[in-house]
C-alpha cells in the first residue's frame, strides 16, 4: 500500500540538541525523522512514512487514518 495516498500531517522544527531539522507527526506512533536541511527533513518524511506503513502491515497492526490536523495528547 505505501503511504503515498495518505495525507498525514507533520511538523518540522529545528533542534538545537541534535543540530538538525526534525520532522514528526502525532498520527504515527514513534514517527520522527531528521535532516541537515529543512528540505532534507521533508524528503525523509515520505521515505520514513512508507517504512512505517510497511512495518505496520507486516506486524498486522492498524494503520491510523489521517486526522486532517495535528493533535498532540
Image: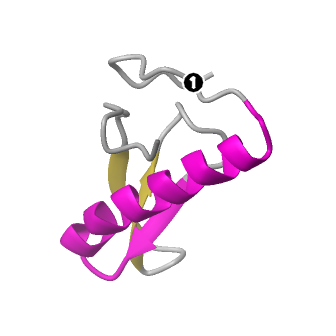
The residue under label 1 is 64
**Left or right: 10 with respect to 49?**
left
Which residue occupies 80% across, 45% down? 59
Q: Quadrant of the C terminus?
A: top right
Residue 57 lies, with reference to residue 49, above or below; the image says: above
Farthest right residue in view: 59
- The reply to whether the magenta stretch includes residue 16 is no
Which residue occupies 47% across, 52% down? 49
Q: Main secondary structure of the magenta part?
A: helix
**Left or right: 3 with respect to 41?**
right
The magenta segment: 32-61
Q: How crowded is mark 1: few (under 14 residues within 10 Å), some or many (20 or more)?
A: few
Which residue occupies 42% across, 17% down? 67
Residue 7 lies, with reference to residue 47, above or below; the image says: above
Residue 20 lies, with reference to residue 7, above or below; the image says: below
Residue 30 image offset from top left, x and y in percent: 66, 48
Residue 58 image offset from top left, x and y in percent: 74, 48
Amino acid at each position: 500500500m505505501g503511504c503515498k495516498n495518505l495525507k498525514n500531517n507533520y511538523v518540522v522544527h529545528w533542534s538545537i540538541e541534535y543540530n538538525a531539522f526534525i520532522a514528526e507527526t502525532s498520527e504515527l506512533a514513534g514517527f520522527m525523522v531528521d535532516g541537515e536541511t529543512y528540505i532534507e527533513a521533508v524528503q525523509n518524511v515520505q521515505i520514513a512514512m512508507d517504512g512505517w506503513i510497511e512495518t505496520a502491515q507486516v506486524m498486522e497492526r492498524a494503520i491510523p487514518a489521517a486526522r486532517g490536523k495535528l493533535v498532540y495528547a
